[in-house]
Image (cartoon, grey):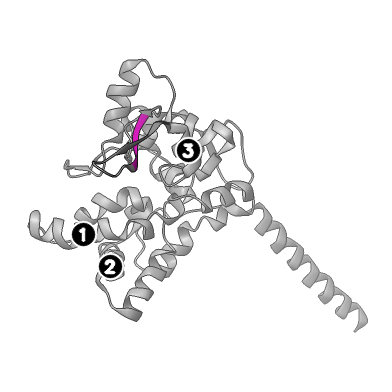
């Protein structure tokens, strides 16, 4: 009996060690097919899955506007869903129209079924026009979805030039640096270092049905004015590499980078005016010079 008990205990320990080893060696995987459930959708693309190995990058990203790409754009996107699509374009709000906003604000929307895409669009609408608890619940849902690590490091990789980059491989993490990982399959993608990778969303967006959407004109001023006059820097050089900004990628909402992009000078002169009684006054002339690689303000 003692021998049997010992054998059984040894067997349990073997199973435990085997399961730990399997878990440690398991590759990080992502869905390759449609998802119909919101909770499953959130967990599948949650950037916290990457935080265990990339804690510093995750902390940087969590402070960025990419991490709140849905809640920071409620008004504009909800207006498009409630006015632009049904009233101006006279179309039904289906996934084909929904992705014209969310393909950039939520790249993983490509894996959502038609019903889930409409559910997420519904949260965006309720977050703007809903009342009390309904509005609070919708905003809480939207806070859980954003431009995740997988959105940039896989889904959007081939969006710039699929004829050159080829078709992306589901589950592969494409990086801007060469190297391998035990946690997932990795491939080097130099496009991540180039401005055109950012421009596909921060400029003219071309939808799968061929329609184009102008959310901003940043790419036009960058290409035609900055590059056209001899500018050499990429988006990443100013918004990521400079001052080790990393995945915070600060923009117009960050005072430090705004000060770097705009030179401000002022001339102030005091004088008096009036008839019979002099009144003190001041004349102020302000001079603003754009030192950024694109027009300001823009996005």
Mark 1 in CB contact with mark 2 (< 8 angstroms): yes
Inter-mark Cα distance, 2 to 3: 30 Å
Does label 2 or label 3 sit earlier along the sequence? 2
Of the two numbered discs 3 and 1 in the rendering, the one whose residue sits closer to the viewer:
3
Q: Helix or strand or loop: what does disc 3 sit on?
A: helix
281 in the magenta segment? yes
Query: Quick one: SS at disc 1?
Result: helix
Q: CA distance from mark 1 to mark 2?
A: 9 Å
Q: Secondary structure at mark 2?
A: helix
User: Where does the image place residue 180, in percent across and percent down from the top left?
Assistant: 61, 37
Q: Which quarter of the rendering shows the C terminus?
A: top left
Q: Which mark is residue 128?
A: 2
Taking the image as drawn, is residue 236 in sight?
no
Q: Position of residue 30 (x, y in %)?
A: 47, 54
| Residues packed near mark 3 inside 10 Å, few (<14), some (14 to 19) or many (20 plus) | some
- Name the N-terminal-most of marks 1 and 2: 1
> Mark 3–mark 1 contact, CB under 8 Å?
no
Residue at 38 percent across and 32 percent down: it is 269
The stretch in magenta equals: 280-288
Q: Residue 266 appears in which quarter of the rendering?
A: top left
Q: Is residue 8 magenta?
A: no
> Which residue is disc 1 drawn over?
79
Would you identify the image quadrant in which residue 242 lies? top right
* Pointer 1 local density, CA inside 10 Å: few below 14, some 14–19, many at least 20: some
List the residue tagged with mark 3: 257
Asked if 123 appears above or below 2 in the picture, the reply is above
Q: Residue furthest right?
A: 2
The reply, left or right, for residue 228 in relation to residue 11 is left
Please tell me the numbered disc located at residue 59.
none
Across and down, in percent, residue 127 comes to 31, 69
* Number of residues whose C-alpha sits closer than 10 Å to that of mark 2, classed few (under 14), some (14–19) or many (20 or more): some
């Amino acid at each position: 009996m003692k021998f049997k008990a010992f054998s059984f205990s040894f067997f349990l320990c073997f199973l435990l060690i085997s399961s730990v080893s399997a878990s440690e060696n398991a590759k990080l995987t992502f869905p390759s097919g449609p998802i119909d459930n919101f909770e499953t959708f959130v967990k599948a693309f949650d950037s916290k899955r990457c935080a265990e190995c990339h804690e510093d990058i995750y902390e940087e990203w969590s402070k960025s506007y990419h991490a709140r790409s849905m809640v920071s754009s409620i008004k504009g996107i909800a207006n498009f869903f409630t006015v632009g699509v049904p009233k101006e374009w006279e179309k039904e709000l289906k996934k084909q129209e929904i992705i014209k906003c969310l393909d950039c604000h939520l790249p993983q929307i490509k894996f959502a079924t038609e019903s889930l895409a409409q559910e997420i669009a519904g949260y965006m609408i309720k977050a703007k026009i809903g009342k009390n608890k309904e509005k609070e619940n919708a905003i809480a849902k939207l806070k859980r979805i954003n431009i995740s690590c997988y959105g940039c490091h896989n889904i959007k990789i081939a969006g710039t030039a699929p004829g050159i980059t080829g078709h992306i491989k589901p589950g592969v993490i494409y990086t801007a640096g060469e190297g391998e990982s035990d946690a997932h399959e990795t491939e080097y993608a130099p496009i991540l270092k180039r401005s055109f990778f950012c421009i596909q969303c921060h400029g003219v967006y071309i939808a799968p049905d061929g329609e184009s959407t102008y959310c901003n004109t940043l790419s036009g001023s960058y290409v035609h004015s900055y590059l056209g006059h001899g500018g050499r820097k990429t988006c990443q050089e100013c918004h990521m590499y400079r001052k080790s900004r990393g995945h915070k990628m600060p923009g117009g909402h960050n005072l430090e980078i705004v000060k770097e992009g705009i030179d401000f000078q002022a001339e102030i002169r005091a004088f008096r005016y009036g008839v019979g009684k002099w009144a003190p006054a001041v004349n102020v002339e302000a001079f603003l010079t754009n030192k950024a690689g694109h027009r300001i303000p823009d996005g």
